[in-house]
Amino acid sequence: MQRKIKIMKSIDKKLFQQELTKDFTYKFDVKSRGLYLVEITASCKNWRQNALSLRSFFRDDDLAIKIDNQTFPKLSGKRGLFDGEASWNGNKLKGLEQTNLFFLHFNKGEHTAELLVKGKPKPKFIKVYKVDKKDKYIPSNNPAQSGNRRPWLTFAFRNIGLKKLEIEASAQQGKWFSLFKRDDSDIKLIIDGEIQKNKEPKTHKYWYWCGKTLKGKNKTFDKELNLSKEPHYIELWANRTPETKSINLELEGEDGYNKSDIQSYSYKGISGKEDYNGFDDDILYAVNYWNKEFLSQKYPPPEPLDANLVKAMIYIESRMGYFNPSAGYPDVMQVGGDRNSAMKSMLGEKDYPANEFISEKKYGHMSYNFKGKKPQVLKPAESIFWGVRWLYYKAQYLPDENKPYKREWHSWNKAVQLYNGGGNKNYEKEVYDIYKKGADGRKRPIIKLFISIFALLGILTAGSVLAYTIHDNQGRTWLSFDESLDKEALYELNINKVVGLEVNKTLISTMHEHGWDYYTLPKEGNPYIDWRDVLGDEAVTLIVRGNTVVEEYETHYVLKETKKGFDIIYNLPHEFGDSDLRPAFYGDWVEFIDIDGDKIYEVRESVFIPYSNASNAIWSDWYRYNKEKGIYEFFKREVIDEEEHDLGDLVEPAEKKGRWLIQRY
């Protein structure tokens, strides 16, 4: 479904009167499932402003957000949450306001927006909108406050496709701000890290709306984007006081699951040759089809059906067709067959409609009109399609058929129980053991199809689960903080990998009570895993990243996957010998860039250095991977005068600027 956003009214609002000194949680209710917009305006001061007020020693104010435990990290992972596109960073804002807009799907009920605080940021308000096709949106904080080149408006999208972007805005010709300085109003547009260039002559090419040439006139950016459902960011940066006239977004995919949403089963049967993920596409099609059908009706279910629940049912019904090929295949959801009332009811055979489909037939909201689709089971896809339809039938009921029609809904676990028809009293539990825990406990030993977030809590002997990801051909991998054998340590960070029936651990870093290790990743540093093929075809690699104990720095550990787990790839700085290998890269920025096109990425490690008597500078050390030694080695230092360049200059191609492209993931 496509949506063009127009002017809308907020359904909930929170105003703030003062700065925040600690994390703050805002709770709000939505009355119906759908697409919503959460708008937040806030300001943050930089370290210089805080130093002048003596309220913080060289620390800026920062603000980040979690909405229903969903975070919005920087696309490249730099500095974690507090330097993401959708955060508020004091060193960039310098006390000015930034408005961030978050588009998400909410189910009916209570939701939370948790503001994560560093320093003393000052939020102005939180507003929540229900997005409708007939609404138009004009953001707050418009026109921009007068200031020099900083984030102004940011749009963040989670699991929502962005089809088209249309922005109409204006920018004024410059005014005199001092005796010898005039500055235009400008707007920079960045889409998923890519600056949209101004191709008009005599303009600032990294500012799509340039006041120097527009002189107050309107200009429209109109582009088909067709971005998928991965997280996306649209950023508008302001110079001085530009103004947006209208913003239109065409969105897709508000309902429905995709491949990234469905749980992968790593178990391959006793033979090791069974594929339990072969029906994923059929499951997604069936669930999305019937979810869309019923969610669009007058009395929709309060929650859509989860594709992973259907997958668990197929496993219990037929072990994905492998249990008994003569009976379980192709009818993998056991919805067809001569003795099955489900198919007979959907076909409208004699005696069955009155018993099974009386509610639907009598009140006509579906009846037997399946829009040209004939209920039959000749292949697994059809069994899944009609099995999902039958589950939807079992989920609904009428409180009293003698009263005016109003369909009610069972919970999905109750619908699962009714789907079985009472033949197996443990059916619901067996399905939900697979759905929630990835465990088939019907026999001993218990079969682990996958390790879920629920099961991980039982597997770990100490610590907390931070993050996990699935690699296509391996078991699940996650980070955990655990107790350390080192008596002087507070805890240690490990990366865990399931290999066969075992969990192998690799030590990343150890946190000591009085230690000051630049490479240690503490709990508050929010470390997480990022899979990146930075070594070409040599090995599968991942990067463990997060903020260090030095608050403004980030650390990147590069690890190579092995049969037993992972090995850390060390790096050799230019000023030290082999005995001083470092386990990780750290600094204000750490970037992986394939500068020579050989698919083996070089590393740029950068530090921002402010000077009081000279221009600020960015110092960068470059490292190249030595395949024979299995380490990264220093090969170049680069110093850039920060004030001489527009931020966009740093991403100029090599052939134009003599510097390598800073590529974002």
Image (cartoon, rainbow, N blue to C red):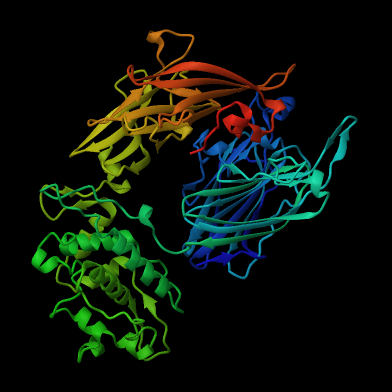
Residue 599 in sight from this viewpoint: yes
Judge whether 579 appears above or below 656 on screen: above
- Left or right: 537 with respect to 428? right
Number of callouts: 0
Question: Residue 284 occupies which quadrant of the picture?
Answer: bottom left
User: At x 80% / y 49%, what residue is drawn?
Assistant: 214
Question: Residue 22 occupies which quadrant of the picture?
Answer: top right
Instruction: Return the residue nearer the eye: 288 or 505.
Output: 288
In percent of width and height, residue 94 lies at 71, 35
Question: Residue 244 occupies which quadrant of the picture?
Answer: bottom right
In percent of width and height, residue 127 lies at 63, 56
User: At x 34% / y 85%, what residue is drawn?
Assistant: 369
In percent of width and height, residue 242 lies at 77, 48
Furthest toward the right, the residue is 179
Instruction: Return the residue nearer the eye: 32 or 179.
Output: 179
User: At x 52% / y 67%, what residue is drawn?
Assistant: 31
- Left or right: 105 with respect to 367? right
In percent of width and height, residue 9 lies at 65, 65
Furthest toward the front, the residue is 655
Judge whether 250 appears above or below 512 on screen: below
- Left or right: 441 with respect to 551? left
Residue 512 in sight from this viewpoint: no
